[in-house]
Amino acid sequence: MKHARPVRFTSSRGFTLVESLIVLVVMSIAAITIAALQGNIFKGQTDNKDFEVGVQLIQGCAEQVLGVRLINGYDAVSSCSNIKIDSYGAPTPNVIKNTANGDTIAGCPTGGTCRLISIQESNSRAVILLLVKY
């Protein structure tokens, strides 16, 4: 009678513990990198939204300034009181130069009285308008 010998496979089946740990470490590093990049993407989207809202506030204020000038006259331009979003604060138009006080403004046509108006939003974005009165 022959004794049965256990059959041993010479080739390995599956992964060793060391190989599995190496793959786990590599996958963890990849996951951390992806999570960090995703955080930067969300911050960029928030910054873009804030910039867009600020530009829209400035545009609304500029349109109001031009509307007040058209309806009430050149000297009535004062503020953008009805344009306000809670987290931003209303943009404020400021007269930064006025030819009525004897100042000269580059680009002011001959025979006209000019006024430079700066409209600044709370995040330091600004637009400068040149208003002319003939």
Image (spheres, rainbow, N blue to C red):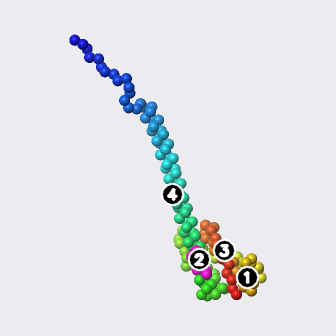
Q: Amino acid at mark 2?
A: Cys
- Relative to residue 124, is residue 83 depicted above or below? below
Q: Amino acid at mark 1?
A: Pro
Q: Is residue 74 visible?
A: yes
Spatial CA span between label 3 and label 2: 11 Å
Residue 128: mark: 3
Spatial CA span between label 4 and label 1: 48 Å
Judging by the rendered image, the residue that carries numbered circle 2 is 61
Judging by the rendered image, the residue that carries numbered circle 1 is 109
Spatial CA span between label 2 and label 1: 25 Å
Contact flag, marks 2 and 1 (Cβ < 8 Å): no
Which residue is located at x 54 percent, y 74 percent?
84
Local SS, label 2: helix
Local SS, label 3: strand
Give the magenta-colored segment's residue range. Answer: 59-66
**What secondary structure predominates along the stretch shown in magenta?**
helix
